[in-house]
Amino acid sequence: MNYEETLKYLFAQLPAYHRLGKAAYKDNLDNTIALDNHLGNPHLNYRTIHIAGTNGKGSVSHMIASVLQEAGYLTGLYTSPHLKDFRERIKVNGEMIPEDEVVKFVEKNRNIIESLEPSFFEMTVAMAFKYFEKRRVDVAVIEVGLGGRLDSTNIINPVLSVITNIGHDHMDLLGNTFAMVASEKAGIIKKSVPVVISETHPETEEIFISKATATGSFISFSDKRFSCTLEESDIMKGERKYMIVDHKTNSEYEGITALGGDYQGKNLKAVFDAVDNLHGVFRITEDNIKNGIRNVIKNTGLMGRWQILSYNPLIICDTGHNKEGLEYVTDQLRRVQKTRLHIILGFVKDKDLKLVLPLFPKEATYYFTKAPIPRALDEILLKENAEKFGLSGECYPDVKTALTAARKNAVESDIIFIGGSTFVVAEVV
């Protein structure tokens, strides 16, 4: 098989959560362990950093990987989902796994894949762990796919665990309260391994403390130790100036982040906290941190986070897709200077629209659309629901048609925003 044939085979053979949703989710690690044993337990041959959370785990994973690259370490990075190319999920020093490596992995392990019938995610994790071993990485930053305790990535024993936050996402699978979701994500906390919790929340704080106490793990809450200020004057730019204050050491750190979203303030606190906890394992300088944060897009290829696609009119996309993420995005959109706001919007079928649609501004012009995946919510149904919340606009069968219409309607001083779903953003980056 060539690369394209291999991808078709994988999508046809294996259930994929990003395409099918809940039907593809497996609530045990049996396949993961069987695959890992078959491959010779490759994840044992390099150090790992494990990152979970409802929002921010992608940005934090990329920034930590970028800092480690700047410090001279050969760094693996596993993230999900991908936007344009499946190979975005598996990178070493920002370079995607080569197509021929994907083909060779599937051909070599086809028998066990067809015997076990793992999920798409289970197979991808196994591929990543084996590729990182082959490349002899110094360290791999591993982003949790969903939850934590039963996630396929949770066979690793990392040098650091990070949990960014708890929010309204996948509650049908992880539990219908913040406390239940936190218990699942706390499943990545390992014996004697330090854990960084990005955000303190009254419903979840004791859950994390209790798990860390039980495992003998040092625990740090980033928002208790650090504060972060983002420069408001450069809100329309792709980059933002930041100021981090470490209240433990009374130190201040200034720099520029390549990621312009307001929500990166929370993520930056987590990154500084994580790096501080990594000093006993890796040699990381202040310049490594500053350069890693500023060069994250160049170093790791991160896309879709308050990403400016073009100017005149300003066109922005963002992968924020749940209540907590969209609160930040919609608030930032309201503050950016503009004549008129055009919003290209699409969601997946299982999204709780009652939580997210009230966040969007009623004065914007909407272009309701859908991504080309089975999980996509029909644009006509989206429009009907949006109208209940005072959002008005027209329907378009695909994202590119919607963007063409928005460009036609917009003047240079307008803003066009594209979002609601990672898969909608994937159509434009």
Image (cartoon, grey):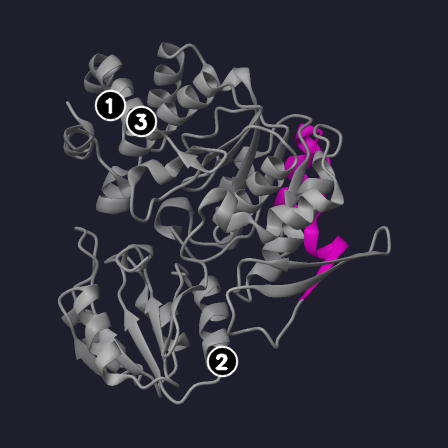
Question: Total marks drawn?
Answer: 3
Return the mark for residue 123. 3
Label 2 sits on what residue type? Val
Where does label 2 land, which residue?
Answer: 336
Determine which quarter of the picture holds residue 343. bottom left
Q: Residue at x 66, y 29 (%)?
A: 193
Q: Residue at x 68, y 34 (%)?
A: 194
**CA distance for labels 1 and 3:** 13 Å
Residue 319 rendering spot, x and y as whole percentages: 39, 59
Is residue 361 or residue 343 the one in the foreground?
A: 343
Q: Earlier in the sequence, mark 3 or mark 2?
A: 3
Which quarter of the rendering shows the C terminus?
Answer: bottom left
Is residue 63 or residue 52 the one in the foreground?
A: 63
The stretch in magenta equals 206-229
Asked which secondary structure carries label 2, the reply is loop
Asked which secondary structure carries label 1, the reply is helix
Q: Earlier in the sequence, mark 2 or mark 1?
A: 1
Q: Is residue 89 magenta?
A: no
Residue 65 rendering spot, x and y as whole percentages: 56, 39
Where does label 1 land, which residue?
Answer: 103
Determine which quarter of the picture holds residue 369. bottom left
